[in-house]
Image (cartoon, helix red, strand yellow):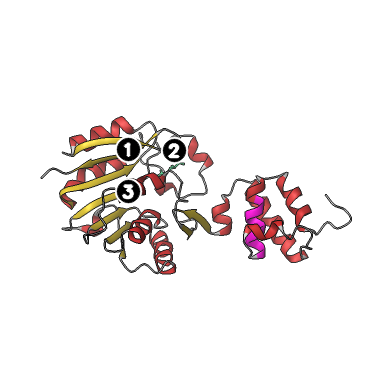
């Protein structure tokens, strides 16, 4: 600590970096100062006002206690976006970009296709698909009205008009409708998985799904055929040990071309299948 001038930006970051990951400290200080993170590096010898120092300290304390930085700053990067997130939404994960890429590979830019994203949370998947396929019509559902409020705000901030949000569990708000592609990152962690303790700040309803974590995937696989056009695709994110179970569920529901794709860490992450016809 620089005792000569303890209020300097570089000194404050150094001492915060002893308590939390230095990158997290930088994100939090940039948030407090309302500047991009890169600004900090050119301003290390600027003084930190007592008010900013106090707010920074409070955030560092919460971060050190395990609260995710995404919630502390209310933002998380996903795809090409800086999305708003809050405690009602799962924090988007980089591995979910695999699901987006696999969906895009099955969505032509030419036709005005219909796409559904079930349990959209912050809207991450639906927003990426709507942005990359401006001619598609995307409908995103969520059982949490708090999550939908955030997802709608994200769509508005991105100026996306080809996306619509509906309140309800899985297919409930989609009665009688069919889609060319259905995507979902549902909850898939087993109810008694100790990993949930690390994720305690995120909504349990977005994470845990029954004794084996597969309850939501069972419902979605069972009900998806009635909501897909012939040749339509279902893509589901799941846990790295659930590939075989997810493939079995899709095959049992009548899907063809069922396969599992691996994420950047080379772990099973997305299972997909196609309706015949
Ligand atoms: N991928 C998250 C995790 O294990 C879980 C997300 C989910 O359940 N959909 O940290």
Label 1 or label 2, whichever lies nearer to me, is 2
Q: Is residue 84 visible?
A: no
Q: Residue placed at 43% from the left, 43% from the top?
A: 95
For marks 2 and 3, give the CA distance.
19 Å
Q: Residue placed at 18% from the left, 58% from the top?
A: 177
Q: Which residue is mark 1?
A: 214
Q: Which residue is mark 2?
A: 264
For marks 1 and 2, give the CA distance.
23 Å
Q: Name the foreground residue: 236 vs 98.
A: 98
Give the mark nearer the N terminus: 1 vs 2: 1
User: Quick one: quadrant of the C terminus?
Assistant: top left
| Ligand 1 within 8 angstroms of badge 3 C-beta | no
Cβ atoms at labels 3 and 1 below 8 Å apart = no
- In the rendered view, would you say 252 is above or below 231? above
Label 2 or label 3, whichever lies nearer to me, is 2
- In the rendered view, would you say 208 is above or below 12? above
Locate residue 267, reporting x and y percent. Answer: 41, 33
Is 134 displayed left or right of 274 in the figure? right
Q: Which residue is mark 3?
A: 184
Q: Name the foreground residue: 32 vs 277.
A: 277
- Which portion, as a residue range, is magenta? 25-33
């Amino acid at each position: 600590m620089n005792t000569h001038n303890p209020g300097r930006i570089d000194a404050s970051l150094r001492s915060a970096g002893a308590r939390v990951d230095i990158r997290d400290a930088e994100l939090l200080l940039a948030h407090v100062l309302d500047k991009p993170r890169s600004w900090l590096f050119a301003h290390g010898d600027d003084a930190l006002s007592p008010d900013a120092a106090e707010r920074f300290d409070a955030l560092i304390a919460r971060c050190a206690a395990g609260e995710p930085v995404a919630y502390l700053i209310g933002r998380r990067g996903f795809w090409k976006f800086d999305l708003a997130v809050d405690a009602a939404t799962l924090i988007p994960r980089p591995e979910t970009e695999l699901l987006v890429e696999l969906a895009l590979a099955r969505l032509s830019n030419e036709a005005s296709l219909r796409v559904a994203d079930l349990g959209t949370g912050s809207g991450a998947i639906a927003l990426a698909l709507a942005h990359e396929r401006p001619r598609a019509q995307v409908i995103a559902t969520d059982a949490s009205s708090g999550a939908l409020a955030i997802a709608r705000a994200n769509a508005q901030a991105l100026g996306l008009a080809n996306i619509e949000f509906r309140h309800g569990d899985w297919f409930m708000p989609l009665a009688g409708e069919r889609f060319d592609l259905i995507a979902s990152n549902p909850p898939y962690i087993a109810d008694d998985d100790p990993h949930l303790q690390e994720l305690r700040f995120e909504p349990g309803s977005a994470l845990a799904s029954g004794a084996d974590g597969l309850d939501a995937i069972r419902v979605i696989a069972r009900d998806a055929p009635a909501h897909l056009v012939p040749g339509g695709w279902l893509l589901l994110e799941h846990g790295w040990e659930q590939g075989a179970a997810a493939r079995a569920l899709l095959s049992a529901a009548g899907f063809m071309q069922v396969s599992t794709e691996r994420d950047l860490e080379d772990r099973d992450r997305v299972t997909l299948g196609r309706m015949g016809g």
